[in-house]
Amino acid sequence: MLTRVLVAGRDPTEIRRLRDFFVGTPDIEVRARVISNGHADPLYGVDVEPDLVVLHCGAGHAEALSAWRDRPAERRPALIVVGPAGHADITRLAIRSGARDFLPEPVNPVDLIAAVQQVGAERRSEADDARGAAHVFVGATGGAGSSFIAANVAHMLTAHAGRKAVLVDLDLNFAPTGHHLNLSAERGLIEALEEVGSLDESALQGFGALHSSGLRLFCSTATHAVLSKDVPPDRLAAFLSLLLRTQQDVVVDAPHSIDALTATAFGVASEIHLVLQQSTLHVRNATRLVRILRDELGVSPARLRVVVNRYSKDSILQLDDIRRALGVESLATVPSYYQRALASSDSGVPLYVADRNAAITKSLLDVVAQITGAAPEKPSLLRRVLPAFLRN
């Protein structure tokens, strides 16, 4: 993670000298600013806010520290002050201004670089602590409905739960989630992976397609056949890592295959949602996939979630049979509501918009609640008794 440093002060010679200390230091981008034109605030007129300000504060130039102290706390980056040794007033003002460190002149370059690198290390640690969660949806077989579920769950995370979320479609040739959301993009997942080394949160806005809910979809826009072996998995890992640093939730729709790309997604997933239907073929394939995930890819069983799609209580294969076969205690069910799901998919209008009160929509809201840790909504007493009044 790059640490952007602004060296500021009133003495041009000292500012250039301090700036030159950082030349060639990895992971540090440094700029210099001479405070002038009657403005004491080191950040006045700065277009890109730095992560850290190194403020040179000579004797008689304490007004920059006073201006810094007057800034709202949330608009103050980290601060390191370089100033005259033995100048008690400047030292006290630096402390009151929230400075992370005070380095007396003549400053040792090694000490200054070490102080800046310490701030950078703390930022990286905070970023790791604030990482989002990846939720991978994969079907036990093709046609299980995992893409439809992934697209709608991702939409509900933004439209219903108010979360900052993105959807990544790993089907490099057909990209079904774009159909479910009626989205397309000029620059998609393949292009983002090609440039992942230079991307940050701002640059990501130039890729993918943005839904009206705020959900951004990253999917393939290739017009030619794309083989997964031609996409380096380390680029996907870097791309997912970037998304996890900037999003609360990263929903991944994984195709029904085991390759380097899907293995990469499974490896970073907080949860893997295995979607299947009530058939012996689906259960057999799901059992095998669970074994591969657990024994060959090292996925903890605690990270596995099972979703039974198009559930019918009248099916010969019951939920207890699926629990025993897969060795799970709990699973989610999405009821069979074929016409509603087909209409949503064909129109590209998500279920949460098309029919918020449908049973299929409520079942997916339960999945969203499980992801976010929120309690599923329950009908109020008034809503439960109102239909009785309407029938009378």
Image (tube, grey):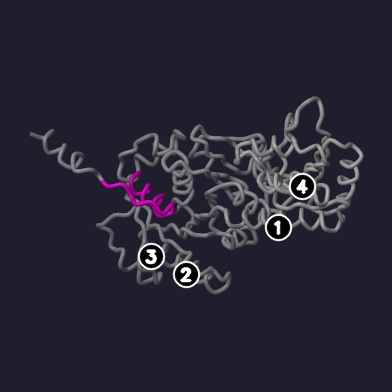
What's drawn in magenta, residue-wise?
A: 361-378
Can you tell which of label 1 and label 2 is closer to the viewer? 1
Can you tell which of label 4 and label 1 is closer to the viewer? 4
> Which quadrant of the figure contains the C terminus?
top left
**How many numbered marks appear?**
4
Can you tell which of label 2 and label 4 is closer to the viewer? 4
Say which residue label 2 marks.
Answer: 301
Say which residue label 4 marks.
Answer: 81
> Which residue is at the far left?
392
Earlier residue among tags 1 and 3: 1
Q: Residue at x 34, y 55 (%)?
A: 333
* Image disc number at residue 121: 1
Q: Residue at x 41, y 65 (%)?
A: 283
Can you tell which of label 1 and label 3 is closer to the viewer? 1
Q: Residues within 10 Å of mark 3 (few under 14, many from 20)?
A: few
Say which residue label 3 marks.
Answer: 280
Of 313 and 107, nearer the camera is 107
Q: Give how far apart the Cα atoms at labels 1 and 3 are.
A: 52 Å
Q: Residues within 10 Å of mark 2 (few under 14, many from 20)?
A: some
Vertically, is 11 above or below 193? above
Indicate left or right for 30 with 138 as reference.
right
Residue 235 placement (x, y as % from top left): 70, 54
